[in-house]
Amino acid sequence: MTSSPSSVVPARKPSGLSWQRVLLLLVLVAFAAFFLTPLYVMVSTSLKSMDEVRNGTLLSIPMSPTFEAWAKAWSSACTGTDCGGLKPFFMNSVFMVVPAVLISTALGALNGYVLTKWRFRGSEVMFAFLLFGVFMPMQVVLLPMSQVLGTLGIASSVWGLILVHVLAGMPSTTLFFRNYYAGLPDELIKAATLDGASFWQIFWRIVVPLSTPILVVTLIWQFTSIWNDFLYGVVFSGADSKPITVGLNNLANTTSTVKEYNVDMAAALIAALPTLVVYVVAGKYFVRGLTAGAVKG
């Protein structure tokens, strides 16, 4: 005997938020507030005048927001004996980061392509040496790298910093691309080879168009690493080639009669702004690229 459709009891839908979800949301909000509080303090302090900084509290909202501290940090704050602000340091970082990121990413893609699809005798040994560079402490290469830059005649210059970051980033970029390309079907390469495609034609027309996820990951990774680097910048730069991290350090450590915390906070935000913008704009693509690389690798 079958039951009529009207006698079927519909499935109960979950009603509202359970206490587990509420607890999870509260924990997530608490952690988010904990990690975002320093950023809030930096932004709010940079928008205050020094009188408001002295008379207010650390977490107080700016009553009369002003960008005077930002303008001073950019153009007239003292970084040691020079009082030209962070602008020249910022431009040095831009001139250094853009070519270093593009060159190291291109070399990493080419290395990963060769080490996965065009293997040769000794390729695994070569990759092992490259992989060793990922875990090698940066301090180890300071002396030999300074000798190389001196021999090439590009010591204490932006070009020297570009070379240093390209060499330092190539092991990581090669690792990223090799793991990703290991998941690409070998049949694609074989079919293109049978059709008469050359090494470079296969690379540019087949491999590179399929590399968008890992390209995004590598570009963001390299940009962040090079922009935030301080050690190489302070060791290998000259008076006219210091990057933004060195300029920020000089500004923060410059002694004066009155410590201007609002200028220091504005300077720190100026130094961090490019990486913040990159992650806000392309953060979701970075996560997708990492996931794709993890699955394929």
Image (cartoon, rainbow, N blue to C red):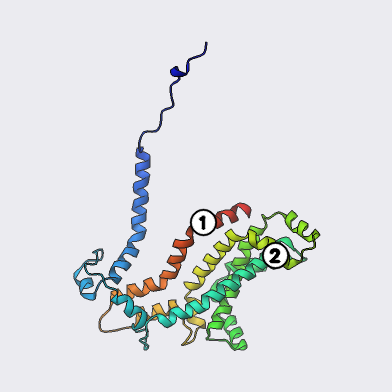
**Looking at the image, which residue is at 68% across and 55% down?**
184
**Looking at the image, which residue is at 44% across and 70% down?**
274
**Looking at the image, which residue is at 56% across and 83% down?**
159
Q: Could one spot residue 124 in this view of the protein?
A: no
Report if the CB atoms under discs 1 and 2 are less than 8 Å apart: no
Q: Is residue 284 left or right of residue 259?
A: right
Inter-mark Cα distance, 1 to 2: 25 Å
Say which amino acid is labelled 1: Val
Mark 2: give few (<14), some (14-19) or many (20+) Cα within 10 Å.
Answer: some
Q: Position of residue 97 (x, y in %)?
A: 52, 75
**Looking at the image, which residue is at 70% across and 61% down?**
116
Q: For mark 2, what is the residue?
A: 203
Quadrant of res 108: bottom right
Q: Position of residue 34 (x, y in %)?
A: 34, 57
**Mark 2 element type:** helix
**Mark 1 element type:** helix
Residue 282 lies, with reference to residue 150, above or below; the image says: above
Q: Quadrant of the C terminus?
A: bottom right
Between 228 and 219, the residue placed more toward the observer is: 219
Q: For mark 1, what is the residue?
A: 287
Q: Could one spot residue 237 in this view of the protein?
A: yes
